[in-house]
Image (cartoon, grey):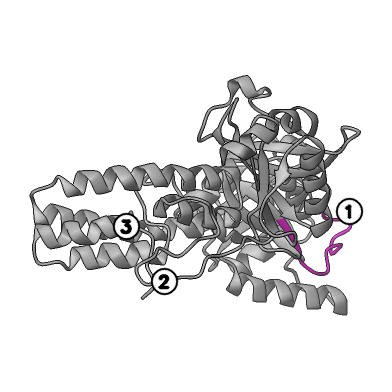
Amino acid sequence: MSPEAESRGGEFEVLTSPGPAAIAVIRAQGPHTGAFVARHLRTRRPPAPECWYPGRILRAELLDREGAAVDDILLSVHALFPTWDLRLHLHGNPWLVRRCTEWLQACGLTRVGREDGSTPTRVHVADEAPTTLWPTEDALEAEACTLLPKMLTLRGATWLLQQVNRLRESIDALLATASANISRETCLQIAARVELVDWFTRPLRVVLAGPSNAGKSTLANALADRPVSIVSPTPGTTRDWIEVPGEAEGFPVVWLDTAGLRESRDALEAAGAARTRQLLCEADEIVIVLDATPAADAPRAEFLATFSDLRPACVVLNKSDLIESAAGLAVSLPREWQARTVTVSATEQMGLDALRRALLRGAGRSDAGLDSPAAFTPRQVRILNEAADATNCNAMRTELLRLLEPERTR
């Protein structure tokens, strides 16, 4: 930010392209940003800017002039009072972006960039680093900021921004390492961890499958923490599948509430069951939902006789609030299922955290490795692999230094 802009109270810039999009990002800088924070942002934890610090990612509500919430956003903090440097990650509704820019201007910040909201680019010349969408000369930070809107959970956004420092520290350590073999192995490990990006940008598609009236729709509502599926004691109520976005331990998940699997003469119910079978083949993971009460012995036995070959991430023994123990039922299940059982009461919202943890174990999602440095762009993977292929330490160091430099046009 220029001294002139700071003397005017600050400036803001729409960093993403104009038009409808999943995410829009606005950068706000300068002393008057504090007025915007006080009037138009309400954070959940911590509640006050005095508790913030650079590098913090916060979940916040964007408020209108009357104090009513109009959007659920992410707020990334880069500097605090008096300079202020914030990124507002809004949903990309053009009306919402326009209103936010009006409120920023009303708080005394000056808009920079083109009026259509896009960021002007420089003409590239030989050996000049191309201008990125993000106003930073740090290649790793620019790549992280560009990828940030694709992170689907707060945990993912936090993980990504932490990777900038982790990668930089790893590069510094590799530059000081005298062993080419150790450097080569480390480069390959960092490059291989690029798959972690998918954990936060592509949700697991998880089918909730089981007999009719096992409580799948009630469970879907409990996992979503809102009513998204119609619940009825009448078997066969769900005729089609319903997608329920959510998260498990900070990893994005889409729960698919499906029609019960049973033989039926009802054409619509039979079509729903057929679609469920197709979804079972397409899903990333399967969660089997069984009614654990004695009244469900017959439909449960019929289901097990037909679908015991399924390989679920976990098996939910539902309606546990209506029985004393589900231990006897668990040992009667197929051997591969027994170690994956979770006792749940969807109506009482009991056992849901255990269900989420069991799902993640079955899907291979774990905290192990998340604190290790990981590449998060194809450019980084390419350079790390080229460093690993280098014939000596000096050549390897030359390649590693490229990670810190923006790509140059030729």
Q: Quadrant of residue 225?
A: top right
Q: Is residue 194 left or right of residue 387?
A: right
Of callouts 2 and 1, which one flags the residue occurring earlier in the amino acid sequence? 2
Q: Quadrant of residue 383?
A: bottom left
Q: Nearer the viewer, residue 209 or 296?
A: 209
Q: Secondary structure at mark 1?
A: loop
Q: Amino acid at mark 3?
A: Leu
Mark 2, residue position? 125
Image quadrant holding the N terminus, namely top right
Q: Which mark is residue 17?
A: none
In this rendering, is residue 265 above or below 21?
A: below
Mark 1, residue position? 232
Q: Residue at x 71, y 36 (%)?
A: 60
**Nearest-to-viewer mark from 2 and 1:** 2
**Nearest-to-viewer mark from 3 and 2:** 2
Q: Is residue 369 left or right of residue 262?
A: left
3D distance between C-alphas at marks 1 and 3? 56 Å
**Nearest-to-viewer mark from 1 and 3:** 3
Label 1 crowd (10 A; few <14 / some 14-19 / many >=20): few
Spot occupied by residue 293 in the image (x, y as percentages of width and height): 73, 45
Q: Secondary structure at mark 3?
A: loop
3D distance between C-alphas at marks 2 and 1? 66 Å
Q: Which mark is residue 403?
A: 3
Instruction: Tell me whether circle 2 and circle 1 mark residues in contact (CB < 8 Å).
Output: no
Q: Amino acid at mark 1?
A: Ser
What residue range appears in magenta?
Answer: 228-244
Q: Residue at x 44, y 42 (%)?
A: 162
3D distance between C-alphas at marks 3 and 2? 21 Å
User: Which residue is the extreme one toward the right?
Assistant: 66
